[in-house]
Amino acid sequence: MVVTNATVDEMWDKFKTVMLDGMNIFIPRGTQHPKGTKKNYQPFTAELKQLINQKHRLWKRWITSRDETVFDKYKNIRNKVKSLTVKYAQEEQQKISMECENIHGM
């Protein structure tokens, strides 16, 4: 790849083509997902969003204060968020299951 007696522009063009060829060969290209589609969609309600925000605020407050009452409140909200998340996920799965059964006529 040694270029002798070449101008700066010629050397730049050669470098640029080698670099772009290498990028095309060795750097994988990802697939583009259309906007609006999300993987692992979890159904959120206003109540669940509010509880998650409250959980985050309590966690920040506990980190700064290390107050046990704040930590107890955090654990209570954390458990509510977990139970609601599991509940909504199960309901969503049940809904999908029912739709599949209706489609296939079972």
Image (tube, rainbow, N blue to C red):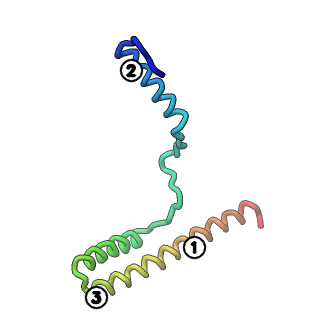
Q: Say which residue label 2 marks.
A: 12
Residue located at (54% from left, 70% from top) = 89
Tag 3: amino acid: Glu
Percent from the top left, x then y, of residue 47? Answer: 40, 73
User: CA–CA distance between discs 2 and 1?
Assistant: 59 Å
Location of residue 57 (image quadrant):
bottom left
Locate residue 105, reporting x and y percent: 77, 64
| Callout in the foreground (3, 1) | 3
Give SS at disc 1: helix
Task: Check disc 3: other Cα within 10 Å, few if <14, some if 14-19, many if 20+.
Answer: few
SS at mark 2? helix
Front: mark 3 or 2:
2
- Frontmost residue, 86 versus 61: 61
Which is more N-terminal, label 2 or label 3? Answer: 2
- The residue beneath circle 1 is 90
Badge 2 crowding class, 10 Å Cα cut-off, few under 14, some 14 to 19, many 20 or more, is few
Contact between labelled residues 2 and 3, with CB atoms less than 8 Å apart: no
Q: Which amino acid does label 1 sit on?
A: Gln
Q: Mark 3 points at which residue?
A: 68
Q: Is residue 51 left or right of residue 32?
A: left
Taking the spot 32% from the left edge, 72% from the top edge, the residue there is: 56
Q: Name the residue: 52% across, 46% down.
A: 33
Earlier sequence position, callout 2 versus callout 1: 2
Residue 15 is labelled as none
Q: Residue 45 or 1: which is nearer the viewer?
A: 1
The alpha-carbon separation of the residues under discs 3 and 2 comes to 65 Å
Compared with 59, 29 (above or below) is above
